[in-house]
Image (cartoon, grey):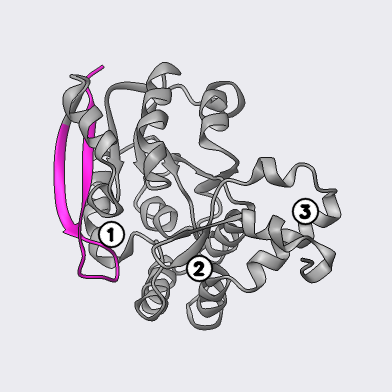
């Protein structure tokens, strides 16, 4: 079966994983490596052209005020009320903001950029000089997020690292001069929450008082992560019951403060 640009449809299908009624593109860096650069670019362009994420970006570019982060967030929320998406949203957003403000971080890491909503929401609160790195495994989503962040005027505060968290985390010290992290927002794939948390520990990226904040720990759920941070003896945990963004489904965020 051949798709647009002569690229195998099966390859394109492999790049997407169905979750929550919508297609979100999972880490497919390895799948794209066999393609030549032109084919790789065409695949990503094809995915972006008909995606919910691209429609969200188009809506923001057409309606929001350039350079106004709140306007960008408002229009992402408005679009997502009619076409559900995996942004933090305007219900969980204040919880995230409260934790960030209380932490007053100097170095932040986000796992799961998606379209850049939470990166914009968090980075606008940060004091001058604070570093905000965000990892996104999907090239298409990373490209959309960069445009969203640029439009919001946050491009000097946010740096997107495109690739797998398991590959990038061990390189944060050497490649990005990160000594330790003050705040980590975990919002990518729930099955990655625990291994990535352990990897942060193993790489010496957490210090006493480092704050982890994990989203979607009830829906779709991250039971292994909750068990680990609550029973390992390494964290002091606080749960914030809330609702899934743009939905009435019960959900929660989990704050885990590293004991060192």
| Image position, residue 55 (x, y; %) | 55, 76
Residue 236, quarter of picture: top left
Q: Is residue 16 above or below residue 246?
A: above
Residue at the front extreme?
1
Q: Residue 105: tell me if it is visible.
A: yes
| Image position, residue 69 (x, y; %) | 43, 65
* Alpha carbon distance from label 1 to label 3: 35 Å
Callout 2 crowding tier (Cα within 10 Å): few <14, some 14–19, many ≥20: some
Q: What residue sits 42% from the left and 31% below the top?
A: 196
Q: Where does label 2 land, which residue?
A: 67
Examine the structure image and report whether residue 251 is included in the region drawn in magenta.
yes
Q: Bounds of the magenta span?
A: 237-260
The mark that comes first in sequence, 1 or 2, is: 2
Q: Residue 102: tell me if it is visible.
A: no
Callout 3 crowding tier (Cα within 10 Å): few <14, some 14–19, many ≥20: some
Q: Which mark is residue 93?
A: 1
Q: Where does label 3 land, which residue?
A: 40
Q: Is residue 60 above or below residue 230?
A: below
Give the SS element for disc 1.
helix
Q: What residue sits 66% from the left and 72% below the top?
A: 49
Q: What residue sits 68% from the left and 40% below the top?
A: 30
Give the SS element for disc 3.
helix
What is the quadrant of the C terminus in the image? top left
| Image position, residue 119 (x, y; %) | 43, 53
In front: label 1 or label 2: 1
Q: What residue sits 43% from the left and 24% below the top?
A: 199
């Amino acid at each position: 079966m051949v798709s647009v640009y002569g690229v195998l449809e099966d390859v394109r299908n492999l790049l997407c994983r169905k979750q929550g009624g919508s297609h979100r593109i999972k880490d497919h860096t390895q799948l794209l490596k066999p393609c030549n650069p032109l084919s790789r670019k065409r695949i990503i362009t094809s995915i972006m052209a008909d995606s919910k994420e691209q429609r969200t970006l188009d809506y923001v570019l057409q309606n929001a005020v350039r350079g106004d982060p709140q306007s960008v967030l408002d229009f992402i929320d408005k679009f997502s009320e009619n076409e559900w998406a995996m942004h933090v949203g305007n219900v969980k957003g204040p919880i995230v903001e409260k934790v960030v403000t209380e932490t007053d971080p100097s170095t932040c890491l986000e796992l799961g950029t998606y379209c850049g909503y939470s990166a914009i929401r968090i980075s606008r609160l940060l004091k001058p000089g604070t570093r905000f790195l965000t990892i996104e495994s999907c090239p298409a989503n990373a490209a959309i997020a960069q445009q969203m962040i640029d439009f919001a005027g946050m491009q000097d505060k946010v740096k997107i690292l495109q690739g797998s968290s398991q590959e990038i985390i061990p390189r944060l010290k050497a490649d990005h001069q990160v000594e330790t992290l003050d705040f980590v927002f975990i919002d990518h794939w729930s099955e990655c929450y625990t291994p990535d948390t352990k990897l942060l520990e193993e790489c010496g990226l957490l210090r006493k008082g480092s704050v982890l904040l994990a989203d979607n720990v009830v829906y779709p759920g991250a039971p292994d992560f909750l068990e680990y941070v609550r029973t390992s003896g390494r964290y002091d945990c606080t749960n914030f019951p809330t609702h899934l963004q743009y939905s009435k489904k019960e959900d929660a965020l989990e704050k885990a403060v590293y004991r060192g």
